[in-house]
Image (tube, rainbow, N blue to C red):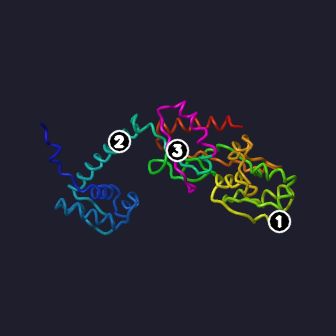
Amino acid sequence: MNNSHSRRRLPPLNAARAFEACARLGSTVAAAAELGVTHGAVSKQISLLESWLDVSLFQRAGVRLSPTTGGARYAAALGRAFDVLDHATKELAESPRAGNIVRVSTTASFAALWLLPRLGAFRARHPDVEVWVSESKAPATVGPEGVDLALRTGRGPWSGVRAEPLLTDHLIPVCAPSLGARLREPGDLARATLLHDEDPLASWAVWLDEAGLGKPAWAGRGPRFADGALLLQAALAGHGVALGRKRLAAGHLRSGRLVQPFGPAVSLGQAYWLVLPARGTPISRATRSFASWIRDVARNSG
């Protein structure tokens, strides 16, 4: 039996990374920027490695660091080893087992009211792909350090990612049928309870102005909810009239659980975006499949 692996004498890997980056870039400051740590931390790791090896790795002359002859050879060897490790990691990430998961970040309301009712169609087309959905309103971190893709609302595009327009939307008043029967025209809203969410684009003041009522003082009154799903749930429960996104309310409108008592429908323009890693960043087969599917769904959703 070959026991050579048990005799490996490996250096502290964080220290080896710091040394290799510093030797390649020529300073602790540049190495710190690449590794995302302080230059003091880089210096400490290099000192740790020198103590562990009992060898001086740099000739120190001012700010610029020059590796010794032995240090230069060691840095080159470490660089090759890290390249091999990087390649093996990427290869594993693209393996059939790792590559059948797509991690999707979106808002709770879009996930619950638009995405989840359609996921069955994706699974039927791609039964080998698992979709993991997480909820967040924050700007999406997509790529190797975050999720595979994101679905976001707002006024894109955003820097550092590739954001594709996915869907437009409109704001409409919606309420339970029992309340809708008492509303004949927009002016009747002055005597109704207005429901709000925290989306700055979904403002009753904007809708009322579009409806010809200006910006009345009562436009800001009424309960507020954290997201669109909770807002529509409050409307379903009969708590008042919500200013909802038409695409998110569509299922409830089709079922008759909510009604739109009157218009207008105020355009939000490009309201939903598909967010992918920046161009040049490798993406998995599962991510490509999901992105292609959701583009098709968006094109065919009217």
Q: Amino acid at mark 3?
A: Arg
Numbered disc 2: secondary structure: helix
Q: Position of residue 26 (x, y in %)?
A: 33, 59
Tell me if residue 263 can be seen: no
Q: Residue at x 82, y 64 (%)?
A: 215
The quadrant of the picture occupied by the N terminus is top left
Q: Is residue 162 magenta?
A: no
Disc 1 target residue = 216
Q: Position of residue 78 (x, y in %)?
A: 27, 50
Residue furthest left as drawn:
1
Q: Amino acid at mark 2?
A: His
Residue 97 lies in quadrant: top left
Q: Nearer the viewer, residue 218 or 274?
A: 218
Disc 2 target residue = 87
What span is colored magenta in the figure?
113-139
Residue 18 lies in quadrant: bottom left
Q: Is residue 132 above or below residue 243?
A: above
Q: Residue at x 79, y 53 (%)?
A: 179
Q: Residue at x 62, y 50 (%)?
A: 109
Q: Residue at x 78, y 58 (%)?
A: 206
Q: Earlier in the sequence, mark 3 or mark 2?
A: 2
**Mark linked to residue 279:** 3
Numbered disc 3: secondary structure: loop
How far separated are the C-alphas under marks 3 and 2?
A: 20 Å
Foreground: disc 3 or disc 1? 1
Q: Nearer the viewer, residue 296 or 228?
A: 228
Q: Amino acid at mark 1?
A: Pro
**Mark linked to residue 121:** none
